[in-house]
Image (spheres, grey):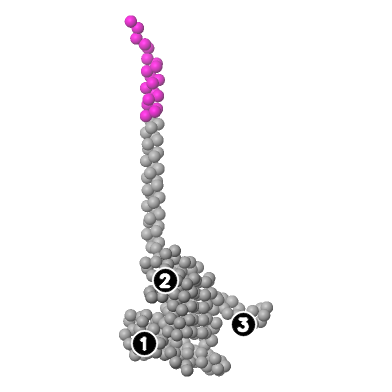
C-alpha cells in the first residue's frame, strides 16, 4: 500500500517540530510532508517500471514543494523534511527511519552512474542511518554513510563516513571533539550549541595564555637585568676601592 505509514509520517512532525500542533496542520501546510507523499507515489510507480510516469509525478511534487527527490531513492518511515525548500535527494540515496533533513540539504552523487569496468550501475549517493540529523545547507556527497543518531551541522560538506553518535561540522566536515549524541535527545539543525566550542572564545583563551607567558618572561628578564646591574655596581665599587691610596702614618 502506497500510503501505509502516512500517520507515522504525520506524527514524526509532531514529535520533532514544536510549531506543529496537529496532524491536520501538518497535512495541510507542511511542504516537507507533501514532498514525501508525492515521493511515495512516484516511488511506487518506479518500482512497477512506470519510469516515465514516475518522473512526471516526481516533477509535479518538486514544482509544488521545492523538494527534488528521485523516485528511485529509498526512504524509510517518519522522515521529517523541515522547511523543505531546496532539498535534493539523489537516485541511489538511502534514508532509514526517523531521519531529519532541513532546508537546502543535498544528498548528491559525485561518481559516474555506471562502473567503467563492469558496466554495472553503482551506488553514488549517501546512506543516512536511523535517527541521523542533517542541518540546513549541508551537502552530503558520494556513497558515504552517516551513522545512527549522527548529526551533520549546518553548511557542512560531508565526503567521508560519519560514525554513529557523532557530530561533524565544517568544510570538509570534521568530528567535534566533545560530540555526544543520544537517540533520546533531538537536536534541531544537527548543531547542539553545547557540543561546539566557541571559536572566538578559543582564540581569546589562546591569546590570554600567550600574554601570560610573555608577562612571566618579561619578569624573568627584569630580574636577570637587575641582578646584572647589581653585580656591575659591586664590581665597579670594588675596583674603585682598590685604586684608592692607602693611608700612611
Residue at 37% over, 33% down: 226
Q: Judge by depth and name the residue closer to the eye, 98 or 33.
A: 98
Image mark count: 3
* SS under mark 1: helix
Camera-near label (2 vs 1) is 2
Q: Is residue 171 visible?
A: no
Mark sitting on residue 181 = 2
The answer to if 138 sits in the magenta stretch is no
Q: Residue 129: x, y in percent?
A: 48, 78
**Which residue is identified by label 1?**
26
Image quarter of residue 205: bottom left
Q: In the image, is residue 233 part of the stretch drawn in magenta?
A: yes
Residue 211's spot in the image, x, y percent? 38, 49
Residue 15 % position (x, y): 36, 82
Query: Which picture quadrant has residue 178?
Result: bottom left
Looking at the picture, how far across and down is residue 10, in whole percent?
A: 38, 87
Q: Quadrant of the C terminus?
A: top left
Lower position in the chain sequence, tag 1 or tag 3: 1
Range drawn in magenta: 230-249
User: Can you identify the residue that label 3 sits on?
Assistant: 121
The tag earlier along the polypeptide, 2 or 1, is: 1
- Under tag 3, what secondary structure? loop
> Circle 2 sits in a helix, a strand or a loop, which is it?
loop
Amino acid at each position: 500500500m502506497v500510503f501505509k505509514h502516512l500517520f507515522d509520517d504525520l506524527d514524526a512532525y509532531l514529535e520533532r517540530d514544536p510549531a506543529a500542533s496537529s496532524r491536520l496542520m501538518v497535512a495541510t501546510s507542511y511542504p516537507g510532508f507533501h514532498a514525501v507523499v508525492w515521493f511515495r507515489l512516484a516511488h511506487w510507480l518506479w518500482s512497477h517500471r512506470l519510469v516515465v510516469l514516475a518522473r512526471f509525478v516526481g516533477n509535479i511534487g518538486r514544482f509544488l514543494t521545492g523538494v527534488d527527490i528521485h523516485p528511485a531513492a529509498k526512504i524509510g518511515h517518519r522522515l521529517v523534511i523541515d522547511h523543505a525548500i531546496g532539498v535534493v535527494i539523489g537516485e541511489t540515496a538511502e534514508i532509514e527511519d526517523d531521519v531529519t533533513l532541513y532546508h537546502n540539504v543535498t544528498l548528491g552523487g559525485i561518481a559516474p552512474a555506471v562502473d567503467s569496468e563492469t558496466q554495472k550501475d553503482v551506488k553514488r549517493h549517501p546512506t543516512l542511518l536511523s535517527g541521523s540529523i542533517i542541518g540546513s545547507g549541508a551537502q552530503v556527497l558520494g556513497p558515504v554513510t552517516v551513522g545512527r543518531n549522527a548529526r551533520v551541522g549546518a553548511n557542512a560538506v560531508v565526503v567521508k563516513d560519519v560514525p554513529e553518535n557523532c557530530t561533524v561540522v565544517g568544510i570538509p566536515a570534521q568530528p567535534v571533539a566533545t560530540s555526544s549524541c543520544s537517540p533520546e535527545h533531538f537536536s534541531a539543525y544537527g548543531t547542539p550549541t553545547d557540543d561546539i566550542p566557541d571559536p572566538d572564545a578559543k582564540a581569546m583563551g589562546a591569546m590570554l595564555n600567550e600574554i601570560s607567558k610573555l608577562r612571566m618572561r618579561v619578569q624573568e628578564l627584569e630580574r636577570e637585568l637587575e641582578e646584572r646591574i647589581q653585580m656591575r655596581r659591586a664590581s665597579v665599587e670594588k675596583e674603585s676601592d682598590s685604586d684608592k691610596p692607602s693611608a700612611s702614618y
